[in-house]
Amino acid sequence: MSQRTCIVWFRNDLRIEDNPALRAASDRGAVIPVYIWAPDEEGDWPPGGATRWWLHQSLHTLSKQLHALGLRLILRKGRSLDVLQELTTQCGADTIVWNRRYEPAIIKRDAHVAKQLVAEGLNVETFTGSLLFEPGTILNKSGKPFQVFTAFWKTCLQRPEPVQTLTLKRISPPASWPKSLSLDDLQLEPAIDWASGMRDAWKPGEVEAQKRLCQFAQGALANYEVGRNQVDIDGSSRLSPHLHFGELSPGQVWRAVMTSKAAGSTSADVYLAEIGWREFAHHLLFHFPHTTHAPLRESFKRFPWEKRRAALKRWQRGQTGYPIIDAAMRDLWATGFMPNRARMIVASFLTKHLLITWQEGAAWFWDTLVDADLASNTLGWQWTAGCGADAAPYFRVFNPITQASKFDPNGAYIRKWVPEIAALPVPLLFKPWEAPGEILMSAGVHLGKTYPKPIVDHAEARSAALAAYNLIR
DNA sequence: TGAAATGTTGGGGCG
DNA sequence: ACGCCCCAACATTTC
């Protein structure tokens, strides 16, 4: 009697360890791992440039890992349902398994795919693989979704702890392998090579993700409460892209924190709460799928956003004349990343100083971040703009000078990314327009030529933002 | 997971 | 010694 054959549909779960779908498949019979490139099934959010670059590297390492287990990663592109149907027929597979994703367009697609496959007599099993808590299961006393983080997270923490880790026992290949495209056929990498900054900053893939997790849990975690805000030394974990692509499961992160020497400290709790925000974002998107493009708070539909093409471009390229903003935006452009503190500062600047819609900011982040995640991106931008769940009050306008002096006190971050003003001393480095002529001269800075004058005046922009927000109160 | 304006307090200089 | 003013430091409120 020939063994059963099971297709594992890999998506944002590009790992071997603690992978419920892969584990289930290996228990069922022979395993055929598949990745299908289908960007036009992602609704209004096809993967951006940085995401595609990362995905290429991550698929490469996953493929190598599977090879070491005696398997292959079958790569395909096209309509997911068509590919899966073709493969099940070709391989005589009777079961298709995957770990669930929660983006609105993907939920719809997956439901359709599952329905069709089941209608053909195939077994479909799906799993919770990228979240600690399944969306829809964390509700308040009246059975509604939480819109305030602390209440949400408190409820999560009362649930049984995620303690299990799934490991593979044995895994067997099918009798024969179906055809696969080569990774280059997917054309994920940029035609013009702009990714050198990303190559220097990142090592995608499960093995490196595990290393970074280990390093973080033994190192920066202990000082996370303070360190996460220090953009100059970067005390953040930098695990977000690994989590987004599922190279790590949140359960693995959870356990690494709980078994580290920092376990139980305030820093450990603060870090776990960040994992909690990730959960919160996914749950919110699940309950309020329209928030990817519309504000959660209805009143913000009336907000007088301004169309400022030129200003948007200067923000995107790090040419606003505010050093901390420009440093962060150039960091993003070069490395596909920005520390969370910097994200809040630049997001506040775009929406409040420039009065440009958060959707424009979200779109830019979507294209440039290696950790671009629809749920987190949506929550983050709506939070900053003041129109989302548990949002920052509308009158909270970050002062880019104060923020820089607090979180980049020596100016190291600014000097790294805005070298043309590096010779200025602090605190003038944070506000070059206040520097006396002779200091600018000796630092080789010519405002308006070698570095832009500020795009707006802070005090004026602040009161304009407050006035605009008053209109919709 | 702010910033700025306004209010209060208390030490020290000074007439 | 005393009151007055200045002002830094801190607290509160307002946006």
Image (spheres, coloured by chain):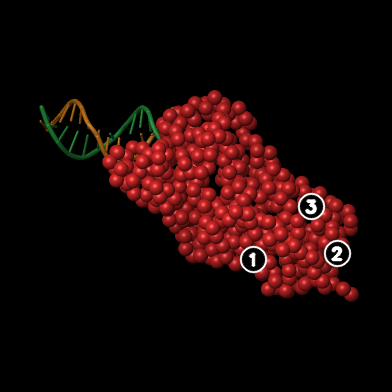
Chain colours: A red, B green, C orange
Q: Helix, strand, or loop for circle 1?
A: helix
Q: Which chain carries label 3?
A: A
Q: Are the residues tagged 2 and 1 within 8 Å (C-beta)?
A: no
Which quarter of the figure has residue A259?
A: bottom right
Q: Determine which residue is flagged by label 2.
A: A90
Mark 2–mark 1 distance (CA, rounded to whole Å): 26 Å
The residue positioned 30% from the left and 43% from the top of the image is A441
Q: Nearer the viewer, residue A341 or A62?
A: A62
Are both tags, 3 and 2, on one chain? yes
Q: How many labels does the image show?
A: 3
Circle 1 crowding by C-alpha within 10 Å: few under 14, some 14–19, many from 20: many
Q: Is residue A266 left or right of residue A411?
A: right
Identity of the residue drawn at 52% across and 38% down = A350
Please, what is the three-letter code of the amino acid marked with disc 1? Thr
First of labels 1, 3 by sequence position: 1
- Same chain for the residues under marks 1 and 3 in the image: yes
- Whichever of labels 2 and 1 marks the residue nearer the N terminus, that label is 1
| Numbered tag placed on residue A79 in the rendering | 3
